[in-house]
Amino acid sequence: MTLTSHITRMPRPFETDRAAEARAACGWADGPLADLIGGVGGTAPYLKGLIEREGAWLEGAVEDPGAAVRTLRAEMLALPFDAVSGGLRQAKRRLALISALCDLAGAWTLEEVTGALTDFADTAVQVALRAAIAHEIKRSKLPGATDGDLETAGGMVALAMGKMGAGELNYSSDIDLICLFDETRYDPGDYHEARASLVRATRKMAQTLSEQTGEGYVLRTDLRLRPDPAVTPVCMAMEAAERYYESLGRTWERAAYIKARPAAGDLEAGSRFLQMLTPFVWRKHLDFAAIQDAHDMRLRIREHKGLGGPITLPGHNMKLGRGGIREIEFFTQTRQLIAGGRDPDLRARGTVPGLRALASKGWIPEEVAETLAEHYRFHREVEHRVQMLRDAQTHDLPQSPAGFERLACLMGRDLGDLERDLTERLTEVHSLTESFFAPDESGGEEDEPKLAESEIVKRWPTYPALRSERAVTIFRRLRPDILRRLAQTAKPDEALVAFDGFLSGLPAGVQLFSLFEANPQLVDLLIDIVGTSPDLARHLARNSGVFDAVIGGGFFAPWPGLAALRAELADMLAREDDYERCLDLARRWGKEWHFCVGVHLLRGLMEPEEAGQAYAHLAEATLSALLPVVQAEFARKHGAAPGRGAVVLGMGSLGSARLHARSDLDVIVIYDPDGVEESEGRRPLPSRTYYARLTQALITAMTAPMAEGKLYEVDMRLRPSGNQGPVATSFSAFRQYQDGEAWTWEHLALTRARVVAGPEALAADVEAFRLELLGRAREPGPVLQALAVMRARIRAAKGTGGPWEAKLGPGRMQDIELVAQAASLIAGKPVRQVPRALLLADWLGAEGQQALRHAYGLAWAIQIGARLVSEKPLEPEELGTGGCAFLTRLTGYKDMTALQAAFAEACAAAAAHIDAVLPDVESEE
């Protein structure tokens, strides 16, 4: 069918000049298609951009939109792996354009539109997942897998949840996926390797779909509907997921699985899993408890989103607001949960089919089902048009009269008529659904543990957070569970004190308590923090505002990366004029992000390697954003920096981008006066003095205790001549020293050096010199001799540490780092990362390389975990059950005894290999 022959309604242009531009992009000067293009392009800026970009393709697609969509799908499935990213984005643009035109013209029904959007999502997920799995197979990371396993993704399945599962995706929808794998496909010994591989593939798939590139994005992808997402990997074994739902699954998760559907990967395995979950989702008895649970969820959503007020059209949320889409969905799903266990005919995925099934079985009146179905379709069409305007994942009606007029134009409706229609429909939906739910506000205090008798608990009602009746009501429901969880920690009394400090510091409670009630995993998070890491608990008690990030939804999002962090902090500092407020702002920003990394590590959202890099990103972003602020403040008195400026050279762990929660920053400041002898300012300084004082100002900005604490401790002892040398070194002096005077250990240290702040031109020159200096291959003998001497001196000065010491001692981190640096120096390849550098050490042999890499990885996991949960040396007896459980999860051992034995064995093996290749220097001083 041609689009022209099926136009039944026509949007009108809001801006006639833009309408003409859109028509010109397609070459249609007149006729129905020209009017349609003009109405769309003259009203929706996003669609106008698509028309201009894909106008040539559109000319053919309108001849048969259905065939065009089918061709798009075939082209997506045929994409080479290296063309997946760009190919999917092009397909997304084209599908978005043709589906919007067919929708706005009335050529497709709502079900055809949402079906096309969902089919596209299914195909995109399948293509992205297949490419990610292919990468793992190519690298031999997925045990036993071959190219023949691509179509079933090595036993992994992506379950489509929510609207995608029901075939009801909206125009600019996120997609909710739960990714699982069939663990029975792998030998027990390969389980962990297979899981790690599939986790990587899942993350890669999500990145391919979600990442915003110059070509746009494909689909915003959310993986957080899986069991307890704060502590579980993004791809879980089916057996583990089944155990979770059987023992801990909640009503909202049952409701979510009404719409669940295998969408990509091993579809048969996914179907088997959903069949296994049938008893969890569909109870055999009439489950009227679901009514209260669903109503609580509605109240929590309203409270959290601030949507509980009367219906007013400007800014009204068509999804979550009164009379909105979510009310119809909750109304339908709750009744399905009540009776679906006894009647399989009620288990429809879609909302409209669900309403009709309920009506056919007498659970709701026929006229109510038809009224709600009609309103649901209308709401979804309005939602689509709101999103079409700017490709925004929004459900809010326009705030301004002009915005409403634009919406009316896109719908081809009179503004007044549209506003009356909206008001009547929203009001009727709210009236039909609200009376069904009747909350029970009773608490559960009779089940509280003995902690409830504490004097600390008795004074809680006097706290500011519990001043309002609503806060008290919500907290009354939360309190028993909180107290029970506190009682289950290793040290309940200490945990109670830490929680009390948090609670007493809250200025208000309704929003946060509502968030906890709506997201019980956040209560788990709070108790985890209190019971596992006293440091994070103290941070939360002093900085309860950190939950703003959690409430905002970005707290558990994927790590933003260095560039985004640097830009964010620089932008925040640029908006602040006062120098001291800038320093405090940087401290608040840093603390919140440090807290985020700590929680991500604590809850399993980051692996030790990822968290180490994230901490390094924070340090580098802080130095990079703060250095210009310090320079600007310094220049107010002494003038601009003479010459080419100064760079900060990160050394040690900062240079190799691997820090933990308490890492100091090892830095060297290098400047280039470029022949300029003195600054120009109110109080000019000689260049050498200028940069020395500027460096001191930077150190003060980083280390000074202020109202918001301090940022980092800074160590500059690795600069030329150590503490005896100037705090800032000129580039010429640095080159001269490194070329003719530096000790071998100083060249070892340079293998990990990296410029982390300062002007790009000077940074490039410093890096070029580093590469040239270290690119000269060395004879192994002298380097290993120097390494042996240095190793012996470190051991004599600092000892070997206790059994849990991760850094110092034979075969431990510092020992292995020195070997990696020596390998880089000998090979003339200054690789910064220790695991990669060890692969250059041919003189260790393959077995030795593997032994050192294994020991280093285990030591790092212990180090980053231990430094997160305690400021003291690691002692399992003092750490408590929660802390020990965290460390064993982080390292993959069943208990601390097994971990200690494995750690000792790994270090001993690494030390033996190191000893075997180094000369004996025990007798040397």
Image (spheres, rainbow, N blue to C red):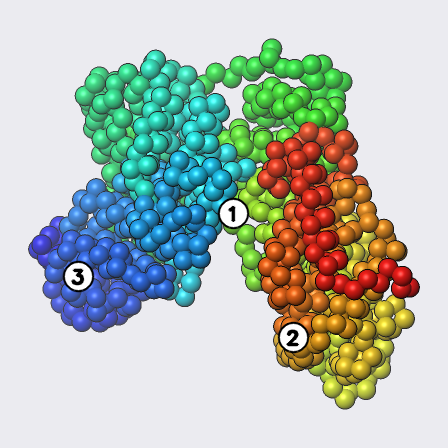
**Left or right: where does residue 661 sit relative to residue 365?**
right
- Report the residue marked by disc 3: 61
**Given this view, does label 1 or label 2 mark the residue nearer the observer?**
2
**Given this view, does label 3 or label 1 mark the residue nearer the observer?**
1
Is residue 605 something that shows in the picture? yes
Secondary element type, mark 2: loop
Front position in the image: 899 or 394: 899
Q: Residues within 10 Å of mark 2 (few under 14, many from 20)?
A: some
Disc 1 vs disc 2: Cβ atoms closer than 8 Å? no
Q: Amino acid at mark 1?
A: Ala
For marks 3 and 2, give the CA distance: 58 Å
Secondary element type, mark 3: helix
Residue drawn at x 70%, y 38% is: 900
* Nearest to N terminus: mark 3 or mark 2: 3
Residue drawn at x 80%, y 68% is: 786
**Left or right: where does residue 658 sit relative to residue 71?**
right
What is the residue that sits farthest to the top in this orientation?
A: 446
Residue 828 - label: 2
Front position in the image: 362 or 122: 122
- Report the residue marked by disc 1: 557
